[in-house]
Image (cartoon, rainbow, N blue to C red):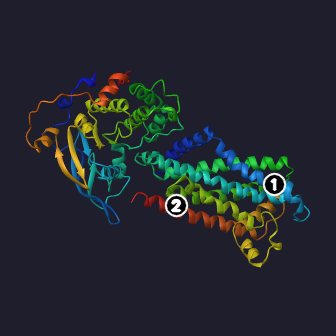
């Protein structure tokens, strides 16, 4: 059973990775908005933002990475929607394969595509002067958190991918996610925000995730934020996976 | 050449003989969406080796029936079996036995024709996927186009590729859901010939169509699905017998526009070739 899932997922993942290789614009488009924000905030607005002693690009990068993932998963939903509306999804479902392989192949493809986009954004940040004193374990921890975050948002993206009735519906759900970092510690410290905004900013998932990645990249020990960040990612992942699987099964009713 | 076989001579399709071997058996099938009843108790049997046409207008329930057979939808009531396997209890075996080509050619446009075939061959776990892909490309006159992306294919080429994909793994039952809807006249004739030659080789084909001429041309047996029920079922001769007796009239037959169109543009179409190229 498990080897079947592995075989079918591998074959189908190879297919959707080939799609990405043949239209690399989806990866570039994913990376362009975060890179533009990086440029805008570092070179235009950053001079007026006080975040302590370090470089602003170091402060900004973690939030930009989350925005990259949030815009990347719009394509995950879009690819799934395209497969369903084009009929190829039903063709695959009518074949004697492990059916969950269909979703897993899209999830794995999403992880790969987002990883490439994230690498592009980090490269641009390095060119802009981003430096990190983090060692290998800290970088691995950063990669782990980003992977978990991408996985959670990917399963979330599966839901509109399965249910959308238009292209706009399939990708539109990502916009609120892209803007969530703006009301967090991603761009400016939350301490300067008025009461209710600050309360929201400090209790939404982006702030602890951003703080954790920032601490790790700065080579500092992580605070209690790390556990909250982990709890948000795992909780979101569990919820999104459950809802996505339920949605998937109800399609066959 | 199998194409020379006429429909009435088809081997394996034992018309008029009651055989126990049915490739498809459906009884009392019901399906509704809320208040809207799509299937109100559909029953039919398709003998192995036959071409069976399910005829009905849009919304009659053809695609719903087909989707239940292909385990893509669950019925509310009734039973359906494919190749002896129950669609509800043994969906995995049903999917081994059936191949579905949808109303809208479900091919991957980003991949090449050959990649599409290899993909399905790998998913169906047949040996030598590349060799099977090359054989099918040759059989369906797509060898030259095999390396091109499907996005560049004509409607008829896509539909041929679609049918070629559904033959991989030699499924016992081939379901063609409106295989010629949206095709130009030449492509439609291409697809007809493809189906005739498949039938000549003994594949059981369930064909849904809203074109009466298509059912008349291709099918051994025809069932008419109307408002979620089978209202007629039999051979063309049996269905004709339901109507008032033949009247003899003398009429001058003008060529139809389709005949004129085909006469002007010619009948060029790739023939199916034997599996040994």
Answer yes or no: do the residues labelled 1 and 2 have beta carbons within 8 Å?
A: no
Q: Can residue A57 be seen in the rendering of this structure?
A: no
Number of numbered tags placed on the structure image: 2
Q: Residue at x 39, y 39 (%)?
A: B182
Q: Position of residue A156 (x, y in %)?
A: 58, 60
Seen in the image, is A175 located left or right of residue B261? right
Query: Are discs 1 and 2 both within one chain?
Result: yes
- Indicate the quadrant where residue B213 lies: top left
Q: Residue B157 is drawn in which quadrant?
A: top left
Label annotation for residue A244: 2
Nearer-N-terminus badge (1/2):
1
Residue drawn at 74 percent across, 46 percent down:
A120
Residue in front for this viewpoint, A157 or B188: B188
Which residue is farthest bottom?
A195
Element at label 1: helix
- Closer to the camera: disc 1 or disc 2? 1
The chain identifier of the residue carrying mark 1 reads: A
Q: Quadrant of the N terminus of chain B?
A: top left
Q: Position of residue B169 (x, y in %)?
A: 38, 37
* Residue at mark 1: A40
Q: State the residue in front, A44 or A188.
A: A44
Q: Is residue B29 left or right of residue B122?
A: left
Q: Secondary structure at mark 2?
A: helix
Q: Is residue B183 placed above or below A4 in the rendered structure?
A: above
């Amino acid at each position: 059973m498990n080897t079947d899932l592995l075989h079918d997922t591998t074959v189908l993942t190879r297919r959707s990775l080939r799609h990405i290789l043949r239209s690399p614009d989806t990866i570039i488009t994913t990376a362009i908005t975060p890179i533009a924000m990086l440029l805008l905030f570092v070179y235009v607005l950053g001079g007026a933002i006080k975040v302590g002693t370090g470089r602003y690009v170091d402060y900004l990068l973690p939030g930009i990475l989350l925005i990259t993932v949030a815009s990347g998963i719009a394509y995950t939903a879009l690819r799934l929607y395209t497969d369903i509306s084009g009929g190829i999804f039903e063709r695959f479902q009518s074949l004697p394969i492990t059916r969950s392989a269909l979703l897993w192949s899209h999830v794995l493809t999403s992880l790969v595509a987002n990883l490439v986009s994230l690498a592009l954004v980090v490269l641009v940040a390095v060119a802009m002067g981003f430096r990190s004193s983090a060692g290998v374990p800290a970088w691995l921890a950063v990669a782990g958190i980003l992977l978990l975050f991408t996985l959670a948002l990917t399963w979330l993206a599966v839901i509109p991918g399965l249910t959308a009735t238009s292209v706009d519906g399939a990708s539109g759900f990502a916009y609120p996610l892209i803007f969530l970092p703006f009301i967090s510690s991603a761009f400016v410290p939350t301490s300067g925000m008025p009461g209710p905004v600050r309360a929201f900013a400090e209790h939404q998932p982006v702030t602890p995730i951003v703080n954790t990645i920032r601490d790790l990249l700065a080579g500092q020990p992580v605070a209690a934020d790390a556990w909250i960040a982990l709890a948000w990612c795992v909780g979101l992942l569990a919820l999104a996976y459950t809802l996505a699987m339920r949605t998937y099964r109800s399609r066959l009713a | 050449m199998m194409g020379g076989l006429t429909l009435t001579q088809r081997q394996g399709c034992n018309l008029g003989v009651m055989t126990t071997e049915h490739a498809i058996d459906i009884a009392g099938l019901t399906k509704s969406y809320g208040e809207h009843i799509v299937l109100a108790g559909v029953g039919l049997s398709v003998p192995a080796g036959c071409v069976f046409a399910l005829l009905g207008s849009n919304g009659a329930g053809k695609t719903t029936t087909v989707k239940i057979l292909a385990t893509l939808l669950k019925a509310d009531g009734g039973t359906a079996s494919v190749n002896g396997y129950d669609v509800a209890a043994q969906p995995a075996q049903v999917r081994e036995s059936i191949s579905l080509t949808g109303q809208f050619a479900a091919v991957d446009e980003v991949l090449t024709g050959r990649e599409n075939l290899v993909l399905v061959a790998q998913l169906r776990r047949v040996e030598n996927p590349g060799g099977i892909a090359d054989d099918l490309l040759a059989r369906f006159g797509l060898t030259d186009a095999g390396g091109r992306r499907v996005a560049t294919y004509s409607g008829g080429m896509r539909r041929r590729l679609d049918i070629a994909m559904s033959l991989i793994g030699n499924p016992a039952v081939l379901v063609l859901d409106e295989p010629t809807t949206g095709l130009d006249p030449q492509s439609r004739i291409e697809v007809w010939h493809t189906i005739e030659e498949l039938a000549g080789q003994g594949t059981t084909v369930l064909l849904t169509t809203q074109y009466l001429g298509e059912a008349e041309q291709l099918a051994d047996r025809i069932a008419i699905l109307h408002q979620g029920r089978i209202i007629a079922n039999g051979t063309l001769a049996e269905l004709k017998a339901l109507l008032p007796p033949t009247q003899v009239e003398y009429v001058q037959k003008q060529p139809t526009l389709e005949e004129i169109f085909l006469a002007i543009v010619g009948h060029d179409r790739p023939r199916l070739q034997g599996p040994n190229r």
